[in-house]
Amino acid sequence: MTLEEKIVRMLEEQKVSYEVVEHEPVYTNPVMAQVLGVKEAETVKSLVLKTREGRLVVMVLPGNKRVNWKETAAGMQTKKVSFAKPEEVSEAVGCEVGCVPPFGHLTSLPVYMDSDLTKKDWVYFNPGVHDKSFKIKAWDLKKICRPQLI
């Protein structure tokens, strides 16, 4: 079962309304927003980060924001976090960098979320592929991810 199929199954099991938007392959949030005709803040950036202790986590934030490394490390109760290497991302979540979905719990990775994301009505995320985006209510995203908010 592909990562996308796992996400569809999870959304349907949780009775979460979603819309699939097919588009040209996108590799950044600004391009994703442009292709979808939405604000970059409505796109979801899901990053696999590595703590100083070597633990991998998923950080989910609005597409227009950058990681605040100090706040993120403090929220994860570690001294330092950095980007995981592309091969670590692929191995941990089953897709390449640039289309990581916000659902770390489909793997064993904990999910942390920027609280600004929960203030949106709708958000768009990649389901593990570059040529599709899923649209769901931001509240549903939070409910499904069960993240720790930062």
Image (cartoon, helix red, strand yellow):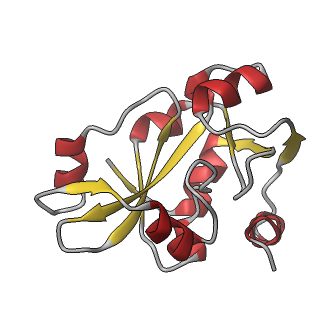
Q: How many labels does the image show?
A: 0
Figure check: 61 above or below 119: below
Residue 43 placement, left or right of 115: right
Query: Would residue 143 be found to the left or right of residue 128 on screen?
Result: left
Q: Residue at the location (53% across, 76% down)?
A: 91
Picture coordinates of residue 134, whole percent (x, y): 77, 46
Give the residue at x 27% y 54%: 82
Q: Which residue is drawn at 82% across and 70% down?
A: 5
Work out whether 54 lies above or below 18: below
Residue 55 relative to residue 62: left or right? left
Residue 12: x %, y % from top left: 84, 66
Q: Where is residue 145 in the image (x, y as percent from the top left)?
A: 55, 61
Pick whichever, 42 or 82, lies toward us.
Answer: 82
The correct choice, above or below, for 132 with respect to 31 in the image is below
Q: Which quadrant holds the N terminus?
A: bottom right
Q: Quadrant of residue 55?
A: bottom left
Residue plotted at (77% across, 44% down): 133
